[in-house]
Image (cartoon, rainbow, N blue to C red):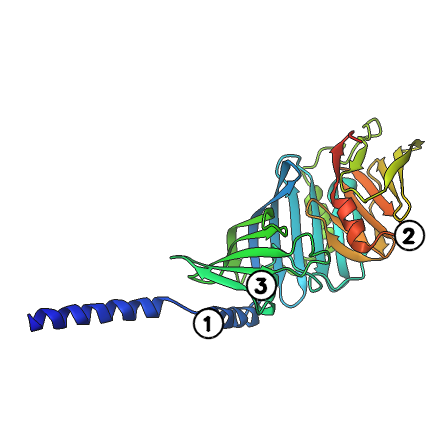
Amino acid sequence: MRKKLMLLTTGLMAILLLAACGSKSQDDVVKELKGKQDDLTSYKVDAKMTLKMGTDSQVYNVEIWHKDPTFYRVNLKNAEKDQSQMILRNNQGVFVLTPALNKSFKFQSDWPQNSSQAYLYESLIKDIVADKEAKFSQTKDHYVFETKTRYQNNSVLPFQEIKLKKKDLSPVSVKVMDPDRNPLVTVEFEKVKFKADFDKDDFEMKKNMTRAQLGLPAMAGGGENDALTVKYPTFELKGTKLTDEKKIDLENGKRVVLSYEGKKKSYTLVQEKVKAKEAATTFVEGSLVDLGFTIGAVTDHSMTWTHNGVDYMIASKNLSKDELIEVAKSVQAEEVK
């Protein structure tokens, strides 16, 4: 009996020891992530990003390249509409390329350091490390963190759930959530390769523009006969209403000007569809903003972006940057006032 009791006790101790060895605390994992970030030299990642916009969802394939310290290439492609946009950072600056329109914009920006980026691994680590109140849990194969975000308008998307593989701390998924913790942006990482190799010119603007344009339809970006489908913002500013709508024929396209007026808030929304132009890089003042479905630029009094071959601009003297961004994100409804 005594021998059986000793064997049972030894077995329990062994189980407890194994359990202790296999379980790490939140501090242990955060420490490992800091080390992972310090050793991060390069990576290539393929991911799928799903955006919930009202009752609809849009899915994008995202290809991310990073080379230490500051080279980035993020290619966002709509899985259904064969449209793409690319964020590029190299020694010359930060660029946003729209290959179908032969357009490139240059930003004076410290992107991606200035806010959360759900598809950039080192940004996720930074969010985890920065949030001293982050929630932590784990499953058999994964570590899960819930952290605050660092978005410019983080009152709309204040939380995110980050899931990492226990094996190598590589990202599995990210859910960016609203204040009620409903996921509005979901990123699922399908392939992650650390210590990736790159050619010398892989982050050059001209090469990436040319490579992205290969295989595009001859009239990509809209021909001169293409109609401009007017979009109306669904984000409501209290007391602000649509008061005027002007449609203007241009030499090479169409323009619509919407005026929204109110006692305290007012703005103008301009939508313009033009044919693809000769290659030219335009310098853009303002901060680069990831709207989810496209990349835009925000200043104190304006918001600009391009989507589905249409240029958009919001101008206002009394909307905050957060309000400009929210109006821009909501410009999606079809012909509904």
Three-letter amino acid code of the residue under disc 3? Ser
Question: Quick check: 305 above or below 20?
Answer: above
Q: Are marks 1 and 3 in contact (CB under 8 Å)?
A: no
Label 1 Cα neighbours within 10 Å, binned few <14 / some 14-19 / many ≥20: few
Query: Mark 2 and mark 3: span between their CA atoms?
Result: 43 Å
Q: Are marks 2 and 1 in contact (CB under 8 Å)?
A: no
Residue at the spot of label 1? 28
Q: Indicate the secondary structure of the residue bearing disc 2.
A: loop
Among numbered discs 1 and 3, the one appearing first in the sequence: 1
Q: Which is in the foreground here, disc 2 or disc 3?
A: 2
Q: Indicate the secondary structure of the residue bearing disc 1.
A: helix
Residue, x 71% and y 42% (percent of image)?
213
Q: In which quadrant of the rendered view does residue 204 lie? A: bottom right
Among numbered discs 2 and 1, the one appearing first in the sequence: 1
Residue 105 is at least partly visible in this image: no
Q: In which quadrant of the rendered view does residue 276 lie? A: top right
Residue at the spot of label 2? 317
